[in-house]
Amino acid sequence: MNKKLYVISGPSGVGKGTVIKKFLDRNPDFMLSVSCTTRLPREGEIDGVNYFFLSKEEFQKCIDEGKFLEWAEFAGNRYGTKKKYINKCLEEGRNIILEIDTKGAIQVKKQMEDAVLIFIAPPSLDALENRLRGRHTEDENAIQKRLKEVKEELERAKNFDYTVINDDLEKAVGELEKIISGERLC
Ligand code: 5GP
């Protein structure tokens, strides 16, 4: 079986975390890459599990030393994927999912042609805003920053290999499974 990198992006609040979690529960031979970020941990988030939480200085040092496969600034914080981490997982023959923003996804595709880019889209922009507010994880300032990113994310999604609309969780996970099993045969 081919081991590939599957990159999943989507605007904040689209529910991509839930779609991915359900996919991983049903497909235990896949693993989710752990990214680095300068964002502060949310309640319940654990260093090394949800993210590697770095200071701005530590993150900058990794950029300077060329340690990232990709990195991007998103809503005022930096996020990045370490090359070493991904290479190690691929060498171990693992199927990896990267949950990263669209800027990062496009950087990955430039370096790894085989990477499969999948965009999770909301059924509508109103639904997205309601979800983002309803989860109560960000203050108003952070919500505004994330909403500003949405338009650009949708524009960049045109360069993706696939789009899955998340209007129904079960349906979205099913579509993701179909895309990935099709790609695994390539
Ligand atoms: P959050 O702060 O909600 O966890 O993530 C904000 C955004 O950063 C999401 O779109 C998420 O997919 C993206 N993100 C998480 N990790 C990475 C990464 O390693 N690189 C890039 N480019 N984006 C990331």
Image (cartoon, rainbow, N blue to C red):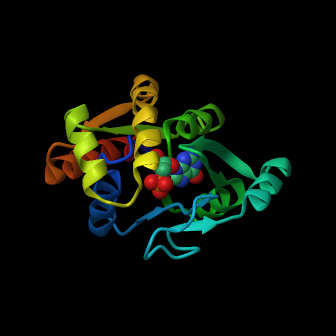
Q: Which corner quadrant holds the N terminus?
A: bottom left
* Residue 173 in view (yes/no): yes
Residue 30 placement, left or right of 63: left
Q: Nearest the camera: 129 or 60?
A: 129
Residue found at the very far front of the displayed protein: 140
Total labels drawn: 0
Residue at left 38%, top 46%? 12
Q: Nearest the camera: 52 or 27?
A: 52
Q: Position of residue 24 (x, y in %)?
A: 34, 64
Q: Where is residue 16 in the image (x, y as percent from the top left)?
A: 33, 51
Picture layout, residue 161 above or below residue 182: above
Q: Nearest the camera: 46 or 83?
A: 46
Residue 20 placement, left or right of 160: left
Q: Position of residue 46 (x, y in %)?
A: 52, 76
Picture layout, residue 69 above or below residue 84: above
Residue at left 34%, top 47%? 180
Quarter of the figure with residue 28: bottom left
